[in-house]
Image: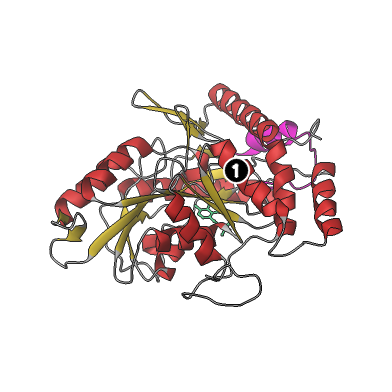
Amino acid sequence: MSEGFIRFVRELYDEPSAPIPLHAPVMGDLEKQRVNEAIDSTFVSSVGAFVTQFEQDVARFVGAKYAVATVNGTAALHAALLVAGVQPGDRVLTQSLSFIATCNAIHYARAEPVFVDVAADTLGMDPRALRDWLERHAEVRSDGHAYGRTDGCRIRACVPMHTLGHPTRIAAIAAICAEFGLVLIEDAAESLGSFVGERHTGTFGRLGVFSFNGNKVVTTGGGGMIVTDDEDLAIRAKHLTTTAKKPHLWAFEHDEVGFNYRLPNLNAAFGVAQMDRLPDLLASKRSVAEAYRQWSDATGWDFVTEPRAADHEARSNYWLNALRLADEAARDDFLAETNRAGVMTRPLWTPMHRLPMYAACPRGALPVTEQLAATVVNVPSSARGDGLA
Ligand SMILES: *Cc1c(COP(=O)(O)O)cnc(C)c1O
């Protein structure tokens, strides 16, 4: 069943026999130069000019006023939730169909996730499911916050995720968050280079979060970023992620329990080089996605394109390309055949509400989450490195 697919992918990457990874980083002389500069400067750790430059590069690219670099995307999410005012016992709306980092960060903030369904075309949080859950379960009190009608728990924030890089209906979600007094934090870990209209994902909420893990569109080895237009939140995020140390020429004074979440200068140097590559990487990834789309159209496979709806002008970075299979059995056959042939494919994540740690969390009906989790597979998606500096 999968031979045609395997042949197509081997041709796409011009790789007749070696294993083909799901997503490999593209790196070379640019990265070596920057990392060498960091070594020569002797600033390889938590102090150094590359961190600031990397923050500025990302802020400029996404169109945010401020950016704060962190050791990874999970740490960025955790710090973003804390500076957003999420407190122990609060609830945070999110999607069950996500990488575990989203949920774990909510848990680290000692809040409880609430799962709402995703939309079949965006794979991200469905604003109709969000509104439905809030209308059934929440009331906005005179302090402007939403509370659970029966349990009285404060519902503080909403963390939608731009799944596989495809922009979710973030403008509609932002309007619902405003109506219910929720802080919107975008998990844009997968969507650097994805836009809704002219606006970059991660800049619709009060805070947005990116990841620079090795498998993301650009990498710093490991790393993350918080972006915001709110100066106070940016200052708070920087403070909290740098051990909450009060600025002083020599004294160590800390005014709260902070975190050692700052991105090392060595990783930031790598990231500066990757940001220089980003336009080329995005163009290459788009050409890979276009090749999948044409092949799927010609052969009857069901390729997941960027959302194309009248109400949602989305441009995806096509971080991970995906196919929809007929059912779970067809999906499992496909995974077995392709991985055995050295073409790496993966199912989506087990939905969070089916993991033991999060099974008891409140949730709405999740039929689309269940359907996508059982049928969607990710296929090799690396940018093609040839011709890149
Ligand atoms: C990659 C990713 C993160 C962050 O992961 P880190 O490995 O901590 O950088 C968060 N959320 C989602 C949805 C992700 O895919």
Residue 189 in the image, given as x and y percentages of width and height: 53, 49
Residue occupying the far bottom of the picture: 252
Can residue 203 be seen at all in this image of the molecule? yes
| Depth order, front residue of 152/250 | 250
- Can residue 216 be spotted in the picture? no
Mark 1 = which residue?
Answer: 58
| Extreme residue in the front direction | 249
The crowding category of the residue bearing disc 1, from other C-alpha atoms within 10 Å (few below 14, some 14 to 19, many at least 20), is: many
Residue 111 x, y percent position in the rendering:
34, 67
Please report the bounds of the magenta region as a residue range: 1-24
Please determine whether, in this image, residue 36 is positioned above or below residue 125: below
Question: Considering the image in quadrants, where does the N terminus appear?
Answer: top right
User: Tag 1: residue type?
Assistant: Val
Q: Secondary structure at mark 1?
A: helix
Residue at image location 62% in from the left, 56% down from the top: 223
| Picture residue at 54% right of the left edge, 70% below the top | 246
Q: Quadrant of residue 8?
A: top right
- When the figure is inspected, residue 71 is found, relative to residue 292, above or below; the finding is below
In front here: 332 or 380?
Answer: 380
Figure check: 276 above or below 231: above
- Name the residue at 26% across, 59% down: 155
Indicate left or right for 361 with 315 as reference.
left
The magenta stretch spans residue 60? no
> Would residue 313 appear left or right of 258 to someone viewing this image?
left
